[in-house]
Image: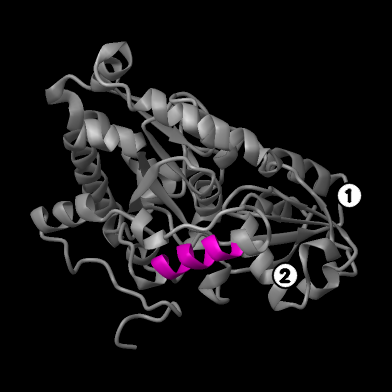
Amino acid sequence: MTLTRRGALRRLAAGGAASLGLPGGARAQAATHTLRIGVAQPAVGQPPSIAGSSMAIAHAKGWIEEAFQPEGVKVEWLFFKGAGPAVNEALTTGQLDFAFQGDLPAIVARSAGLQTRLILATGVRSNLYIGVPPDSPLKTVADLRGKRVSLFRGTNMHLPALRLLEAQGLAEKDLKILNLDTAGYLAALSTRDIDAAIGAMDILRLRDKGQVRVLYASKGDSPVFTRQSHVLVTDAYAAAHPQHVQRLVDAAVRTARWSSDEAHREEVLRLWARAGTPYEHWREDYAGEPLRVRLNPNFDPFLVARYKDAEAQTYRFKLSRKRFDVEGWIDTRYLQTALRQQGLQNYWPVYQADGKALGA
């Protein structure tokens, strides 16, 4: 699914919500025994690995499956090369109960009528990178005007990229944007078919080969230019199986606590490296940043402000056609229960809307 197919998504959302809401029957019975989690990234290797979040650690360790084993509930992970937009299609057709994805695709789906709720933050403040050929004359983000630049539209990379461009006096229309996925923009950048790529840490692979120079990285810049992600659940599944939602959040919070422990930093980064990005790049990207900041499961004022801004920006840039209440979309009941039961109410730092630590 692409952002130009909002009408199709809206129709699918209505049909998907209806199928998810069926009382009893084969669909409800299957959901009782199989809990399906969609992941907005492809898995790599055998066993399949993902990276960049506490949910990736939960997947690697099998801790979600372990939590549901006493009830005989099977946990199924589904990975999507098409990232957030592809996850949206699966959600709207009733193929998923939970999804781990970024802010923009979830906002587009919610504005189109898909009934979901955000229940957990995961992998927040992920950095944005811009790569150019090593001998490129481009020196600043402002120099991208009129250039051929790749951007994976519809993902959580899209909005912070637009914010960054806007901060430099540019709009999306001022660039010749090509919509390429990760493999596509890495290939196009290495063959010089594009002038620049706005992407993620994957750009560092080409830098290490001497094929790319990093023009910009959000690391050290304002956190408003970073990427945010979450776990959401469909309203229908939450209504039918609240105990399963709570059990998943409980396990996810325990994982976030373990992953946020600096004593586990090396193991966390090496587990993520199994998904293809070298350990050295994870170490570089996370250098100087506490794990408690990047792997914080809470919707603190900073993250709520980011989602509010993202929802407003999505509408302003005509990526959605309908506004909705973000605070009503975020459901922290399960999270607060897990934090209280595990004594973690004050474990993670709280940040204000401007990205500064509370009390700073």
Determine the residue located farthest toward the bottom in the rendered image: 360
Three-letter code, disc 2: Leu
What residue is disc 1 on?
Answer: 192
**Is residue 144 at all visible to an observer of this figure?**
yes
Magenta stretch encompasses residue 34: no
What residue is disc 2 on?
Answer: 165
* Residue at image location 78% in from the left, 55% down from the top: 210
* Residue at image location 57% in from the left, 53% down from the top: 156
User: In the image, is 7 to the left or to the right of 306?
Assistant: right
How far across and how far down the image is residue 315, in percent? Answer: 61, 60
Quadrant in the picture for residue 42: top right
Classify the position of the C terminus by image quarter: bottom left
- Secondary structure at numbered mark 2: helix
Q: Is residue 72 above or below residue 271?
A: above
How far across and how far down the image is residue 62, in percent? Answer: 29, 32
How far across and how far down the image is residue 298, in percent? Answer: 30, 61
How dense is the environment of label 2, judged by Cα within 10 Å: few (below 14), some, or many (20 and up)?
Answer: many
Magenta stretch encompasses residue 311: yes
Three-letter code, disc 1: Arg
* Residue at image location 28% in from the left, 52% down from the top: 256
Check residue 3 in the rendering and tell me which mark sits there, or answer none: none
Depth check: 238 or 354 in front?
238
**Is residue 86 at all visible to an observer of this figure?**
no
Cα–Cα span, label 1 and label 2: 22 Å
How far across and how far down the image is residue 222, in percent? Answer: 55, 76
Quadrant in the picture for residue 236: top left
How dense is the environment of label 1, judged by Cα within 10 Å: few (below 14), some, or many (20 and up)?
Answer: some
Q: Main secondary structure of the magenta part?
A: helix
Depth check: 51 or 29 in front?
29
The number of discs equals: 2
> Which mark sits nearer the N-terminus, 1 or 2?
2
Magenta range is: 303-313
